[in-house]
Image (cartoon, rainbow, N blue to C red):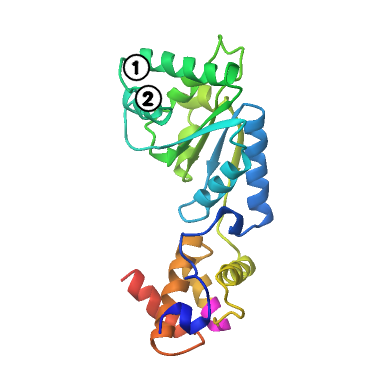
Amino acid sequence: MDVRSAFGCHAIPFTREIAASDHFVLPFYEQARESLRRTIEMRMSAVLLAPAGTGKTALLRGLLADLPEARYQVRVVKVCDLGKRDLCREVARAVGMAPTGTYPALVHKLQERFEHESSNDGLRPVIVFDDAHDLRADVLALLRVLTNFKMDSRLVLSVVLSGQTALRKMLESDEQLAVTRRLACTVTLRPLTREETLAYLDHRLRIAGVSASPFDQGAVDAMYEISRGNLRALDGLALEAMQLAARAGQQTVGSNQVLTARRNLWP
């Protein structure tokens, strides 16, 4: 039997295919999302720090859903180990510009594009740099350059730096003081507590159509101890354990399936 037929769900639970409206909501997630939204509304910049697997991408998806397309022009740029000019070219591609020219010329053309969107199109430009912890220290200065309009007399472009906690160390260095002073808001995510883990598991099962949780207390305890509240690890463990139970014809998932799931996922 597969998971859906074994547990009576209409969708496979614990996958990444989940609508933004179905994301698990906790007060600290809502506070982080609201802080980022308010910062963007003020045309200022922010940083989102989160350990891998703690819901950074889900929070960003929810944030982008909060920004009306009629008012905001949002671009997401996936960061990798690039120099200033190459990253500037990636931004140009994201905004639909030809990624050609020298670094100063590209910056100037990007600023002109953002000013046009703001003044003529009535849109507020926003750039989200995802995986910003991979930015080189010297490239981070691009944030300061891109957000400098009319000798710093106008707020046009909002930038959100989204990355793992290693980004904090870079931003706290003396060399990045000019950049960090442009960040009006810093929000940080954390792993779930034991109680939040149970609520998260129940939520993901419910939106998949499972009426009663198949996980016994031993399974829940094992998943928390192994994952330490990391959402990505929880999803992997829960789905693999349910698949193991389904193949064995069992309707209850115990700690044995969770431990086997851990060995299967992370040998």
**Front-most of residues 47 and 42:** 42
Q: Amino acid at mark 1?
A: Tyr
- The residue indicated by pointer 1 is 103
- The residue indicated by pointer 2 is 88
Tell me residue 221's x, y (percent): 55, 77
Task: Answer few, some or many: residues within 10 Å of disc 1's Cα (few below 14, many 20 plus, some between 14 and 19).
Answer: some
Q: Are marks 1 and 2 in contact (CB under 8 Å)?
A: yes
Tell me residue 164's x, y (percent): 46, 46
**Front-most of residues 220 and 201:** 201
Determine if the magenta segment contains residue 217: yes
Determine if the magenta segment contains residue 251: no
Tell me residue 240's x, y (percent): 41, 74
For residue 122, the mark is: none
Residue 156 to residue 243: above or below: above
**Front-most of residues 207 and 139:** 207
Q: Which element is circle 1 on? A: helix
